[in-house]
């Protein structure tokens, strides 16, 4: 750098700094607008609407109400994120089977579907920072003798096809086991348990507990197991979509910092984030 350019650089930097300091000091003092701010902003392009895929058969995370609207914890979180990020979103009900494909094909821009972040999935999609802690939980009939996960080794178990619940049961029974009944949705698996077609269902704790509490007539109890590892939900975007991912992560940090996340959490789960969902009374009380 020649000394003239250096001096000019320093002058410009000083002017900018004064401007920033003045701007920070008080609203009445109009800061001298730096030259660079002068050119008129380019006309805003029509706002993009981000399409959010969700398998809306997963209360309380995502489900459809009587009016057919998609509602739930995940939905509220993404709405809050969108508001923070200043983007528009539209939720589209998308079957779990094929949901990752829809993302990869570009038919969905992001997913919110209680998707557990796994190493395998990270190879084909990018995940936001985690927004929810979960783990597997068993549901069995209240009068069942099943006491632990290992008891399911030779029994008929219902899972939602392609979920982490499917993964753990497949690991227990072996991938060729004919005793794993794979359903399109978790509620369907739980209906089958009620009908006596399977001996147990293994699925995400939040969903199992919600179902048990809302279907008292089904006479289920829940069983946790030490072998169930901690899982975390993340928001997948198409691999390489760093721009959207950065927006989501920034907005997620913002809603956690300003209390919005805690408010949404409390409205669905009652307890503060961090308190284990599995601590709900269903498991102990029904023994
Ligand atoms: N957390 C589990 C997984 O990622 C199950 C998610 C299923 N979500 C849904 N909306 N059906 O495999």
Image: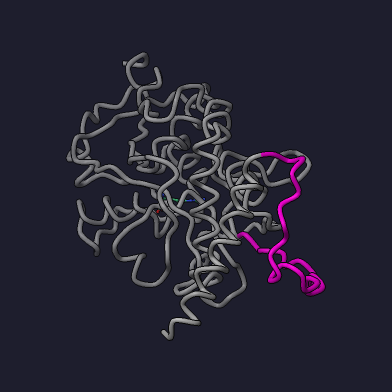
For the record, the magenta segment spans: 26-52
State which quarter of the image contains the C terminus: top left
Residue that lies at the very extreme toward the bottom in this rendered image: 2
Specify whether 191 is left or right of 29: left
* Residue closest to the eye, 152 or 212: 212
* Residue closest to the eye, 41 or 8: 8
* Residue closest to the eye, 277 or 187: 277
**As displayed, is residue 41 above or below residue 29?**
below
Specify whether 164 is left or right of 35: left
Residue in the image at 50% along x and 65% along y: 237
State which quarter of the image contains the N terminus: bottom left
Residue 50: in magenta span: yes
Specify whether 223 is left or right of 160: left
| SS assignment for the magenta stretch, majority | loop
Residue 61 % position (x, y): 54, 41
* Residue closest to the eye, 78 or 161: 78
**As displayed, is residue 245 above or below residue 6?**
above
Residue 49: in magenta span: yes
Residue 155 % position (x, y): 26, 44
Residue in the image at 34% along x and 53% along y: 164
Residue 76 % position (x, y): 62, 41
Residue 257 % position (x, y): 50, 37
Report the label total: 0
**Figure quadrant of residue 224:** top left
């Amino acid at each position: 750098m020649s000394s003239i350019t250096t001096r000019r650089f320093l002058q410009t930097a000083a002017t900018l700094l004064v401007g920033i300091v003045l701007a920070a000091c008080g609203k009445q003092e109009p800061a001298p607008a730096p030259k660079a701010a002068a050119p008129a902003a380019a006309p805003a392009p029509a706002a993009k609407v981000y399409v959010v895929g969700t398998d809306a058969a997963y209360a309380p995370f995502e489900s459809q109400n009587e009016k057919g609207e998609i509602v739930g914890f995940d939905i509220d979180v993404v709405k809050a994120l969108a508001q923070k990020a200043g983007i528009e979103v539209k939720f589209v009900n998308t079957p779990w089977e094929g949901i990752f494909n829809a993302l990869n094909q570009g038919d969905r821009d992001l997913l919110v579907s209680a998707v557990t972040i796994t190493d395998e999935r990270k190879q084909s999609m990018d995940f936001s920072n985690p927004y929810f802690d979960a783990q597997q939980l068993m549901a069995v009939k209240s009068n069942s003798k099943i006491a632990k996960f290992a008891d399911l080794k030779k029994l008929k178990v219902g899972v939602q096809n392609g979920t982490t619940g499917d993964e753990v049961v497949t690991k227990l029974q072996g991938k060729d086991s004919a005793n794993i009944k794979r359903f399109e949705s978790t509620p369907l698996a739980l209906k089958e348990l009620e009908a006596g077609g399977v001996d147990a269902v293994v699925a995400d704790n939040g969903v199992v507990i919600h179902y048990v509490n809302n279907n008292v007539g089904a006479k289920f109890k829940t069983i946790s197991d030490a072998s169930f590892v901690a899982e975390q939900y993340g928001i997948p975007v198409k691999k390489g979509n760093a721009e959207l991912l950065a927006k989501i992560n920034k907005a997620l940090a913002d809603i956690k910092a300003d209390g919005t996340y805690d408010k949404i959490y409390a409205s669905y789960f009652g307890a503060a984030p961090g308190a284990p969902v599995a601590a709900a009374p269903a498991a102990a009380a029904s023994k």
